[in-house]
Amino acid sequence: MKKRLKKLTYRDISGKTAQQIASEWRGYQFQAGPVVCKWHGKWGQVQVWAATAEEGRAVLQKALICGGWSSQAIANGQFTAVTAAGGRNGRTGTMRTAEGRGLIGVSKRQGPSGSPTFAES
């Protein structure tokens, strides 16, 4: 049985539509792994599991840039990377945006309790 890998979520302040966000992520892929990479900033935290700290930093920077964060805000945040000790953590593999049923696996929602809006593929 194939298990789904976790989703990457981040705060979007860009004002872009779901379709615009989806087009920025379409075709993007990275290598998942045992390194827990986090960025802490003024409005919260973004986390990703990556093969290396450099890979994780690149994914987080893409998410923050797509989300409308300025380069200054990104630089003012704190990046950390720690390799997980447990063997159950850090599933490896290529992560990519899922597509199916005419939708791309990228959504946008208004606020923490808003319903997601999906973009058509």
Image (tube, grey):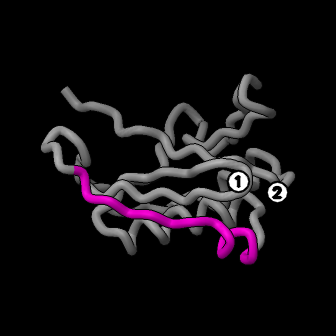
Q: In the image, which residues are magenta?
A: 71-84
Total labels: the figure holds 2
SS of the residue under disc 1: helix
- Give the Cα separation between the discs numbered 2 and 1: 9 Å
The reply to whether discs 2 and 1 touch (Cβ–Cβ < 8 Å) is yes
Q: Is residue 36 magenta?
A: no
Disc number at residue 21?
Answer: 1
* Residue at image location 72% in from the left, 29% down from the top: 112
Q: Is residue 77 magenta?
A: yes
* Mark 2 / mark 1, whichever is N-terminal: 2
Quarter of the image for residue 42 reads bottom right
Asked if residue 58 is positioned above or below residue 36 in the image, the reply reads below
Relative placement, left or right, of 81 versus 100 is left
* Residue at image location 44% in from the left, 52% down from the top: 48
**Residue sitting nearer the eye, 102 or 108:** 108
Asked if residue 59 is positioned above or below residue 119 in the image, the reply reads below
Relative placement, left or right, of 106 versus 97 is right
* Residue at image location 60% in from the left, 37% down from the top: 103
**What residue is shown with label 2?**
14
Relative placement, left or right, of 102 versus 18 is left
List x then y, in percent, for residue 20: 75, 55
Q: Quadrant of the C terminus?
A: top right
List x then y, in percent, for residue 16: 82, 53
Q: Amino acid at mark 1?
A: Ile
Asked if residue 50 is positioned above or below residue 113 in the image, the reply reads below
Relative placement, left or right, of 95 versus 3 is right
Quarter of the image for residue 118 reads top right
